[in-house]
Amino acid sequence: MENLIIMLVLMSLSCSDNNPVDNKPENRRPVILSLTVFPDVIGPSDSAIVICNATDPDGDTLVYDWITDARLRINGANPPDDRSLFNTFENSRIFYPTALAIDTVWVQCFARDRKGKSDAKLIIFTVIRDPLKGVR
């Protein structure tokens, strides 16, 4: 009987909320360290690459969501939704201007850990008519 009581006490201790094995650490959000574009001025028949430098403090694998306005197309996205691309493992994307793109354009990147946490940044660059003359 004494052994049974000891076993029950030990079992109740192992099931308590203070057991470090049962307490999972809180998931922390990824952090985008930088979002860069190269080149930052392009012509109508050029392309630009946007690179997202992100890290996750928990070491989780990140996926990237890319969104842009109607004046850019994302390489790898299929029309008619070629202005967004989700769940990519690559931290960079190539963007092409559309016929409407003679202006300032934008790209937004979301870095997600697939556990509900994310970070986002937006970058702006310019499409000009004649990249050699720098004339809009």
Image: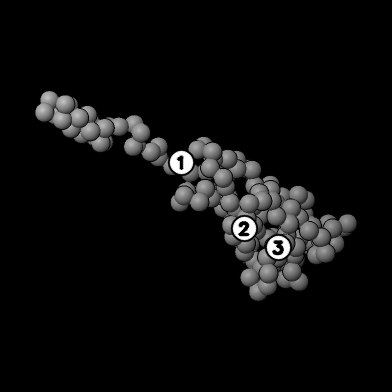
Circle 2 crowding by C-alpha within 10 Å: few under 14, some 14–19, many from 20: many
* In the image, residue 110 above or below residue 5: below
The one nearer the camera, 24 or 36, is 24
Which disc is residue 76 wearing? 3
Q: Residue furthest front?
A: 1
Q: Secondary structure at mark 3?
A: loop
In the picture, the quarter occupied by the C terminus is bottom right
- Marked residue nearer the N-terminal end (2 or 3): 2
Q: Quadrant of residue 71?
A: bottom right
Q: Which mark is residue 28?
A: 1
**Secondary element at image label 1:** loop
Front residue of 1 and 111 = 1
Mark number displayed over residue 66:
2
Tell whether label 3 touches label 2 (CB within 8 Å): no
What is the three-letter code of the residue carrying label 1?
Arg
Whether residue 105 sits left or right of residue 7 in the image: it is right
Residue displayed at 70% across by 55% down: 93
Q: Earlier in the sequence, mark 1 or mark 2?
A: 1
Identify the residue at horizontal 59%, vertical 60% (top origin). 86
